[in-house]
Amino acid sequence: MAFVTKKDSGVKTVVKGFLTGGTQAAITYPTEYVKTQLQLQSKANPEYSGIIDCAKKTIDQHGVKGLYRGAGVRIIGAGFQQMCRWGAYTNLTQIFRDEKTGKLSQSMNVICGLGAGICEAVFAVTPVETVKTRVTDDQRRGTGNYKGSADAIVKILRSEGPVGLYRGAFPTILKQGTNQAVRMPLQVAIFGVISFGDESQKQNPLLPLDCQGSRAMANS
């Protein structure tokens, strides 16, 4: 997934991206939920003292399923996010590769990453984050406006129209675009160092993990 070649199928990449994103979100959602709750609570009169306290109180009040409130849209959205990112990136790399050598220059890789980030922001990240935040905040306040993610989407569209799902879209597009513009060429560069230039190592499942970890430290 991490290193798209000229032979990679767009459809295959999209499917792998969706499954990877959805699985990742399903496993990590409780931490995402707790983080959002802590961000939304009042600074003057905080309801939770920290991560563990938030998780414990949520489970006490709503059961373990409380940590998965709004998870549906996040899991599906994460699948679409990865699908959009890698689908766009794969197609863009086919356009910007050198016709003679079949290689992608670093500058073109930056452009492809930027385009992939913009696509994922528009088609997945912005609407998903909007729904996730509203649903978790609704539960925290106990207002009962939404029964779940699907109900929130329907009500937002009815009351505000599609624009309601895209509040704060520009900063998100800017963030995701620049993030992927840095991520893609950096990931390729790190792979080159770790693999010592051995192209056959692209199929090694451990190398993408090494690159992801190195990229995360570089971006932090």
Image: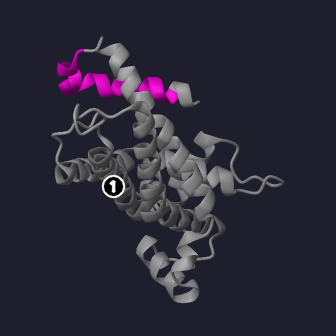
Magenta stretch: give its range.
198-216
Q: Determine whether, in the image, residue 42 is placed left or right of residue 201.
A: right
The correct choice, above or below, for 161 with respect to 126 in the image is below
Q: Which residue is drawn at 47% across and 77% down?
A: 153
- Residue 145, percent across and down? 57, 79
What residue do we see at 25% from left, 53% from top?
A: 14
Res. 63 in view: no
Q: Is residue 211 magenta?
A: yes
Q: Residue at 43% across / 26% down in the picture?
A: 213
Camera-nearest residue between 3 and 96: 96
Amino acid type of the residue that numbered disc 1 sits on in the rendered structure: Gly
Residue 77 in the image, given as x and y percentages of width and height: 39, 60
In the rendered image, the quadrant that contains the C terminus is: top right
Residue 89 covered by magenta stretch? no
Pick whichever, 216 or 111, lies toward us.
111
Foreground pick, 187 / 131: 187
- Report which residue position mark 1 lands on: 79
Secondary structure mostly seen in the magenta stretch: helix
